[in-house]
Image: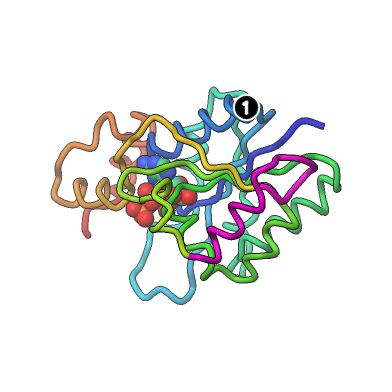
C-alpha cells in the first residue's frame, strides 16, 4: 500500500514554503500523493479571515499541474470547526487500516502539538513527518516540550500504517503567509514568494488589501 501525505493548514494564502514542504516530503518519504486540506473558518477567532472558498481556490490553482497533489474540501465544507484528529479519523475510515498516512507539519506547528485536541490520538491514526522551518528550532532539542521529546524518541522507526515521527530537513524557505499578507496590505510585491496564479487570483479578488 502506497503511503499518502495529509497536509492541513490555513493556506491564507498558500505559498512556496507549503509547496516545497509537500514536494520534498513526497519525494523523501515516497508518498503516492499529498492531500492538501485547507482549514475551515475558525469560529472563535474575532478577526475576519479570508473566506474559506478563496483559500480553497488558491490551493486548487497552486497545485494544478502536479499529478501527485490533491485538495480535499472536507474541512472547508464542514459547518463545525474541524479538529485534525477528527479529519484523520474520517480519512482513515475511508481509506482503511492499511495505507500508511503521513501527517505533514512544519516545525512551528509540531512544537504546538501538545495544545491540539486529543493530540496523542494522532499517533494512532498517522505517522508524523515534521519539516524544519526557519525560526522554529526543531533540531535543537531544548526547544522541544518534554512530552514531545518523549514521543519523538520512542517513535523513530517508521513501520506499519501509523505511529512514527520523522524530523526532516527541507530547503529552508523563510516564507510565511503572515509576511505575505503584510506585504500585500502595504501594496508591496509578494512576487516569487508564491505562485503567479495565486497572486493573480489575489489581485483579481482584491484580497489582503488591509492587515
Ligand atoms: P501564518 O503566517 O498565517 O501563520 P503559515 O505561513 O505558517 O501561515 P499555515 O497555513 O499556517 O502557513 O501552515 C500550514 C503548515 O505549513 C504548517 O504545518 C506550517 O508549519 C507549515 N509551513 C508553512 N510555511 C512553511 C515554511 N516556510 N517552511 C516549512 N513549513 C512551513
Q: Tell me, yes or no, whether the highlighted magenta stretch contains residue 147.
A: yes
What residue is drawn where x is 74% and y is 48%?
162
Residue 128 placement (x, y as % from top left): 61, 48
Q: Residues within 10 Å of mark 1 (few under 14, many from 20)?
A: some
Find residue 81 and report its image quarter. bottom right
What residue is drawn where x is 82% and y is 49%?
94
Q: Which residue is mark 1?
A: 68
- As helix, strand or loop, the secondary structure at mark 1 comes to loop
Q: Nearer the viewer, residue 211 or 95?
A: 95
**Magenta stretch, residue numbers:** 146-164
Would residue 14 be visible to someone looking at this image?
no
Residue 147 placement (x, y as % from top left): 55, 66
Report the side of 117 relative to 144 (left or right): right
Residue 152 placement (x, y as % from top left): 59, 52
- Looking at the rendering, in which quadrant would you find the N terminus? top right
What residue is drawn where x is 49% and y is 73%?
43
Report the side of 13 relative to 119 (left or right): left
Q: Tell me, yes or no, whether the highlighted magenta stretch contains residue 118.
A: no
What residue is drawn where x is 29% and y is 53%?
178
Q: Nearer the viewer, residue 197 or 110?
A: 110
Amino acid at each position: 500500500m502506497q503511503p499518502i501525505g495529509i497536509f492541513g493548514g490555513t493556506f491564507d494564502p498558500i505559498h512556496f514554503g507549503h509547496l516545497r514542504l509537500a514536494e520534498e516530503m513526497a519525494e523523501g518519504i515516497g508518498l503516492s500523493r499529498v492531500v492538501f486540506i485547507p482549514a475551515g473558518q475558525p469560529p472563535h477567532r474575532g478577526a475576519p479571515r479570508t473566506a474559506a472558498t478563496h483559500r480553497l481556490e488558491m490551493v486548487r490553482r497552486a497545485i494544478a499541474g502536479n499529478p501527485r497533489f490533491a485538495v480535499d474540501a472536507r474541512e472547508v465544507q464542514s459547518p463545525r470547526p474541524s479538529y485534525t484528529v477528527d479529519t484523520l479519523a474520517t480519512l482513515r475510515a475511508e481509506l482503511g487500516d492499511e495505507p500508511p498516512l503521513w501527517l505533514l507539519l512544519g516545525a512551528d506547528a509540531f512544537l504546538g502539538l501538545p495544545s491540539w485536541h486529543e493530540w496523542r490520538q494522532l499517533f494512532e491514526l498517522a505517522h508524523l513527518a515534521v519539516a524544519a522551518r526557519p525560526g522554529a528550532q526543531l533540531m535543537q532539542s531544548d526547544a522541544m516540550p518534554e512530552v514531545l521529546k518523549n514521543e519523538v524518541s520512542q517513535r523513530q522507526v517508521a513501520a506499519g500504517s501509523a505511529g512514527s515521527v520523522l524530523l526532516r530537513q527541507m530547503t529552508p524557505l523563510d516564507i510565511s503567509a503572515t509576511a505575505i499578507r503584510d506585504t500585500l496590505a502595504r501594496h508591496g510585491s509578494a512576487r516569487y514568494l508564491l505562485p503567479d496564479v495565486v497572486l493573480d487570483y489575489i489581485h483579481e479578488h482584491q484580497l489582503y488589501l488591509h492587515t
